[in-house]
Image: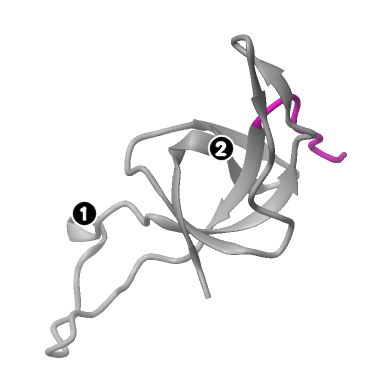
Amino acid sequence: MKLEPLADRVVLKALEAEETTKSGIVLPGAEKEKPQQAEVIAVGPGGIVDGKEVKMQVKKGDNVIYSKYSGTEVKLDDETYIIVKQNDILAIIK
C-alpha cells in the first residue's frame, strides 16, 4: 500500500531518537525524547486551503524538523508514519 497525502499534507517517517547524550550517557527507552527530525516520504499537491493558495515548499527525500506533538501517526505495513500539514514543518535540514 502507498500513502498519498491530500492538499497541504506531508507524510513523514521519523528518524531514530538519540540513544546517548553528547557526553556519552545511554538513555533508557522512557527517557528518550520524541524525535523531531523526519524524512519526507510523500507530499500533497498543495492548492487552495482555507481560501489561501498553498505552494508546497518541501519535496520527497528532504530531512525536516517538525513541531513536537503535531500530526497523526499512521501504521502501514509495519512502518509508522506521521501525517502533518506543511505549516507544522519548521525547517528543512540541508
Residue 13 is situated, as x and y percent measured from the top left of the image, at 59, 53
User: Mark on residue 11?
Assistant: none
Residue extent of the magenta highlight? 1-8
Amino acid, disc 2 = Gln
Q: Is residue 66 magenta?
A: no
Q: Is residue 6 magenta?
A: yes
Q: Residue at x 25, y 56 (%)?
A: 33
Q: Residue at x 87, y 39 (%)?
A: 1
Residue bearing mark 2: 86
Q: Quadrant of residue 3?
A: top right
Label 1: element kind: helix
Amino acid, disc 1 = Ala
Q: From the viewer's perspective, is 2 left or right of 75?
A: right
Mark 2 and mark 1: Cα distance apart in space: 29 Å
Residue 23 is situated, as x and y percent measured from the top left of the image, at 12, 89
Of the two numbered discs 2 and 1 in the rendering, the one whose residue sits closer to the viewer? 2
Residue 65 is situated, as x and y percent measured from the top left of the image, at 43, 56
Count neighbours of disc 2 (C-alpha within 10 A) and say few if under 14, some if 14 to 19, many if 20 or more.
many
Q: Residue furthest front?
A: 52
Q: Residue at x 17, y 58 (%)?
A: 31
Residue bearing mark 1: 30
